[in-house]
Amino acid sequence: MASSPQRPPNLKGLTDAAGASLWAAMNHHDDTWGVRSSDWDVNQNEETVLFTNREDGSQRTAPVQIIATHEIETGLWRWGWDHPSVLPGLQRHATTVRDRGMTWGIPQLTLPRIFCSEERAWQLVAVAFEVNPDASGACRTPTGEVYVYTTFGDPVPV
């Protein structure tokens, strides 16, 4: 669901629209195969995410992109395109956000690091979902003191 590259009226307008699109997509995934009841595991080398449903054990896999990390205590958001732990092949969606942010003149989308709330973090992920047509959803996982936010492509049964 890619949006037009024209400049949106403001970041709030962009994140509101993107958030609604992401919410609808995630509801579809949950209704279809139970994404919210699934654990997930990212394999950076294979550029995939494996979803395992905790209720029935079924599994799905999908292409994955790492959008950013968000430190739980400090609120530090670090875009995937600037993160030393993110392999280059997994930075594409985050890089698209940066490029659109440069076109639109929105610093929050172009600065390598910002401080933000958890709500803003989800809004930024929603923007990544919206501007990357091969994204079909997004999720996050805690890894110690940090959340890792990702987008994923179309999941297929394993």
Image (spheres, grey):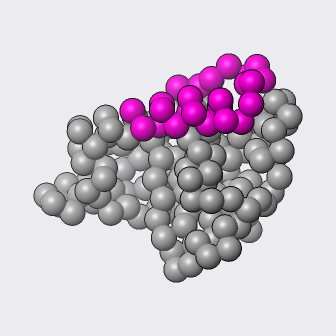
| Looking at the image, residue 36 lies above or below residue 106 | below
Q: Residue at x 46, y 65 (%)?
A: 141
Seen from the viewer's position, the closer of residues 47 and 106 is 106
Q: Residue at x 54, y 67 (%)?
A: 147
Please state the total of marks drawn on the protein image: 0
Q: Picture coordinates of residue 145 (x, y %)?
A: 56, 78
Q: Is residue 93 visible?
A: yes
Seen from the viewer's position, the closer of residues 63 and 7 is 7
Q: Picture coordinates of residue 1 (x, y %)?
A: 53, 26
Q: Picture coordinates of residue 92 (x, y %)?
A: 67, 45
Q: Residue at x 61, y 41 (%)?
A: 128
| Looking at the image, residue 84 lies above or below residue 64 | below
Q: Picture coordinates of residue 111 (x, y %)?
A: 83, 52
In the image, farthest residue toward the bottom: 144
Q: Is residue 154 left or right of residue 2?
A: left
Q: Residue at x 73, y 24 (%)?
A: 8
Q: Quadrant of residue 118 in the image?
A: bottom right
Q: Quadrant of residue 114 in the image?
A: bottom right
Residue 3 magenta-highlighted: yes
Residue 102 magenta-highlighted: no
Specify the segment rendered in magenta: 1-24
Seen from the viewer's position, the closer of residues 130 and 158 is 130
Q: Is residue 87 visible?
A: no
In the image, farthest residue toward the left: 56
Q: Quadrant of residue 6 in the image?
A: top right
Q: Is residue 86 left or right of residue 61?
A: right
